[in-house]
Amino acid sequence: MDEPQALTALSALSQETRLRIVRLLVMAGPGGMPAGSIGDELGASSSRLSFHLTHLEHAGLIQSRREGRSIRYSAAYEALSGLIAFLMRDCCQGRPETCPPAALGNI
Amino acid sequence: MDEPQALTALSALSQETRLRIVRLLVMAGPGGMPAGSIGDELGASSSRLSFHLTHLEHAGLIQSRREGRSIRYSAAYEALSGLIAFLMRDCCQGRPETCPPAALGNI
DNA sequence: CTTTCATTTCAATGTCTCTTGAGATATTGA
DNA sequence: TCAATATCTCAAGAGACATTGAAATGAAAG
């Protein structure tokens, strides 16, 4: 993950509906959920939901596959962990003894 | 960290200058950096830098303390790890056997 | 106390983003 | 094929955000 990718991912996540979609899919696990179920859960109109799902997929945070009539979306776990790694990269210039996040141990 | 806090933090991070500031401070370690040095490093004007530093501080991602003539900023590591924990909370409904991020092990 | 340095405030401008509603597209089953 | 279901596309309007440059504030040093 490089800076432009991280910015795209963070922009995508910094919106209420999209953050809820991603968290829903993270909780759902690798199997994901059909678009319709996501919309029901979030109370979003079909066009609004489609707009945000497309946005998230372009950002690489989710992926989709057609399944019969509906389309099933799932979290892109590697992109999420890549984003997290990017945020903490080179933390404290590699000196773990003065590195608070390592000491906190709750990442 | 709750959803409104996470949204505030993600919005703050989803901007090039602010993401660079945070990464610079994460790399700098707990000691942080004076505002002027951050501006020099990023090539940002004083008003632009001040705008983004204020934004980040309001979002809880950085903190400041006066030091002589200048103001020293440092990363709020707890807020960052809290944000990361929020993103991955309840991952895969707590079933680690089907949990890709746990398997990837690179968070 | 005055000068100097560091940072902040302010208003104006241009740009980007979200939502809405109507219509289009694709897939399945009768 | 026809109808039903599920999702996507599009354009327009309202709102939010980043940048700029000039001026103002605040703290510290001489």
Image (cartoon, coloured by chain):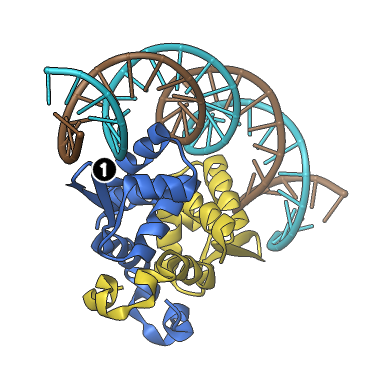
Chain colours: A blue, B yellow, C brown, D cyan
The quarter of the image holding the C terminus of chain A is bottom left
Q: Is residue B92 visible?
A: yes
Say which of B93 and A61 sits in front.
B93
Name the amino acid type tagged 1: His
Q: Quarter of the image holding residue B84? A: bottom left
Q: Quarter of the image holding residue B35? A: bottom right
Above or below, B53 against B93 in this view is above
Residue drawn at (25%, 55%) of the image: A2
Q: Which residue corresponds to mark 1?
A: A58
Q: Report crowding for label 1: few under 14, some 14 to 19, many 20 or more residues within 10 A (C-alpha).
A: some
Residue drawn at (32%, 68%) of the image: A89
Residue drawn at (66%, 65%) of the image: B68
Q: Secondary structure at mark 1?
A: helix
Q: Is residue B18 visible?
A: no
Does residue B90 appear left or right of residue B2 in this picture? left
Say which of B47 and B59 sits in front.
B59
Does residue B83 appear left or right of residue A90 in this picture? right
Does residue B49 appear left or right of residue C2 in this picture? left
Residue C19, horizontal then vertical, whole percent: 51, 31
